[in-house]
Amino acid sequence: MGVFDKVKKLLNKTESKQSGADTVENIGQKSDIDKKISDNTSEKQTIKSGIEKTKSSFFGKIARTVAGKSKVDESDLDEIEEILITSDIGIDTTLKIIDKLEQRVAKDKYINVSELNNLLKEEISFLMQDYIQKEINTTSPYVIMVVGVNGVGKTTTIGKLANYFKNQNKKVVLGAADTFRAAAVDQLVLWSERVGVEIIKQDMGSDPASVAFDTIQSAKSNNADIVIIDTAGRLHNNVNLMRELSKIRNVMGKVIKDAPHDVMLVLDASTGQNAIEQAKQFTQATKVDSIALTKLDGTAKGGVVIGISDQFQIPVKYIGVGEGVDDLHKFNKKEFIDSLFS
């Protein structure tokens, strides 16, 4: 065997080994990518099935209205308006959507059925607020203050939220500042044990602001990443609510600058227009940064997502579409709208 043959053989062996190593590495990378794709697909499917009742009610009615028609004219818009209102989108938001459709019909005298869907899709997307993710500060805990009336799934949402962050390897501390209701504290303790996160609580009737203060102090000294504070779900009137929430906010801000970083309002999608009324009351009492909408899978009133986001200019951040601990999902506007129209 000549010198060149020996060199060629040696190079072939080296390439073969390198190729094998690359293949193993690529397989590992591919496996991670496949898992991410699988997780994303699974989540999309969960959201899609979660809003199936809303889709059937909302777009099923519209489909029946335009069934067999090649075009939609002014006479059909009244019926579409009624469908939007009865889908709990809300009167104000419905009128904005209908106004856009009327402008198009006035211009072209009619629109075809596919154009109707595209116009609805575009207008709903335009009206809904996008959530801009704030970066979680690594030097101090990111503080979430959760507000909402009793019975909307507030405590459950806090538990699922704690689980969500823990799965991202964040250290989470809960604060049981709803000291007016024994059940609220007990439920939050159960969730903390279930998820495996720390909870700070005091005796029934304690000052909620004191609980919030202790929680943030503890989280700060123990280098926690996330603090989630529960608050009272029912006070006697709006003035009391405003006073109590303001007091808690002020105490938080003394311990950590700009805390709370996110005031999250929890609403029950199945209550429809009542959810919009609750949003009105809480936005009058305190600044609200985001919304978590629960029980979306069990209702045909999911159109309330669109109305709330538009009327209050507050983005929906999370949606609950099941009873499981993992059934709280980041709300994706595009996926939500695509699922409604798919």
Image: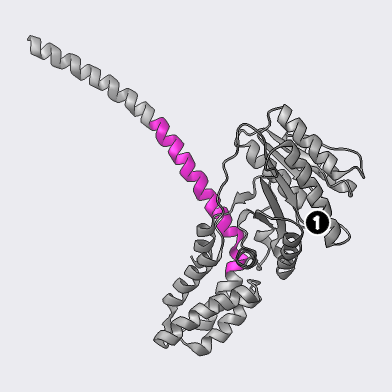
Image-based side of 304 in relation to 22, left or right:
right
In this view of the protein, which residue sits in the foreground, 2 or 330? 330
Which quarter of the rendering shows the N terminus? top left
Residue at 89% x, 60% y: name it.
236
> From the viewer's perspective, is 312 left or right of 251?
left
Give amino acid for label 1: Met
What segment is highlighted magenta in the picture?
27-55
Residue nearest the observer in this picture, 216 or 162: 216
Vertical comparison of 118 with 187: above or below: below
Q: Is residue 314 magenta?
A: no
Q: Main secondary structure of the magenta part?
A: helix
Can residue 196 be seen here? The reply is: yes
Percent coordinates x, y for residue 50 in the rendering: 61, 58
Residue that label 1 marks:
242
- How many discs appear? 1
Q: Residue at x 59, y 64 (%)?
A: 52
Would you identify the image quadrant in which residue 199 lies? top right
Residue 19 vertical position relative to residue 327 in the rendered view, above or below: above
Q: Is residue 84 above or below residue 308?
A: below
Indicate yes or no whether the magenta region holds residue 37. yes
Residue 190 seen anywhere in this rendered image of the structure: no
| Residue 108 sits above or below residue 284 on the image | below
Position of residue 42 measured from the top left corner of the image (x, y, whole percent): 53, 49
For label 1, the SS is: helix
